[in-house]
Amino acid sequence: MPTVEITEKNFQQNIEKKGVVLLDFWAEWCGPCKAFAPVFEKASEKYPDVVFGKVDTEAQQELAGAADISAIPTIMMFRDGVLLFRQSGALPAAALDELVTKAQALNMDEVRAELAKHASEHEHGPGCDHDH
């Protein structure tokens, strides 16, 4: 499947899709982004059931700001609406393949349970005195 242009208008509906969604935050002037583009494109052909979205940070400045993008390229991966991975810098093809394969193999019920547990630990973590 070819890559999809992600904008502020379609961002939410894309990341909430069932399955794996990989986003590449990039800009035209960014050398490493241009070098990574063919790797990302080839992976999109290899994994037709995965959404490969590209976010032009120049055209989508508000979206890039909301996603807290401070360096490009930045790769973000979601599955079933859950952010699983985020990294600044391009990935080699083998690492991108491994990332997609691992994401597809995850048990999302376990991931959600772990996230809920982690969130509740932060909410009522040590050193918090909620009674006073």
Image (cartoon, grey):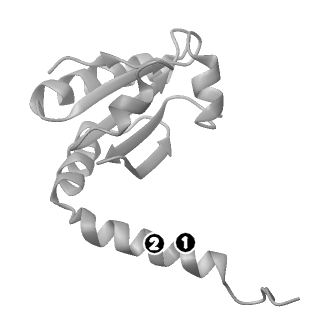
Q: Which residue is mark 2?
A: 116
Q: Which residue is mark 1?
A: 119
Q: Taking 85 as reference, is 123 above or below it?
A: below
The structure residue drawn at horizontal position 42% and vertical position 40%, both measured from the top left corner, is 76
Q: Taking 100 as reference, is 32 above or below it?
A: above
Q: Taking 128 as reference, is 73 above or below it?
A: above
The image shows residue 67 at horizontal and vertical percentages of 58, 36
The structure residue drawn at horizontal position 28% and vertical position 28%, both measured from the top left corner, is 52
> Split into 4 quadrants, where in the image is the C terminus?
bottom right
The structure residue drawn at horizontal position 48% and vertical position 45%, both measured from the top left corner, is 87
Q: Work out how far the residue at label 1 is from the one at label 2, CA to CA, in angstroms.
A: 5 Å
Q: Amino acid at mark 2?
A: Ala
The image shows residue 18 at horizontal and vertical percentages of 22, 43
Q: Amino acid at mark 1?
A: Ala
Describe the element under mark 1 as helix, strand or loop: helix
| Residue 108, image quadrant | bottom left
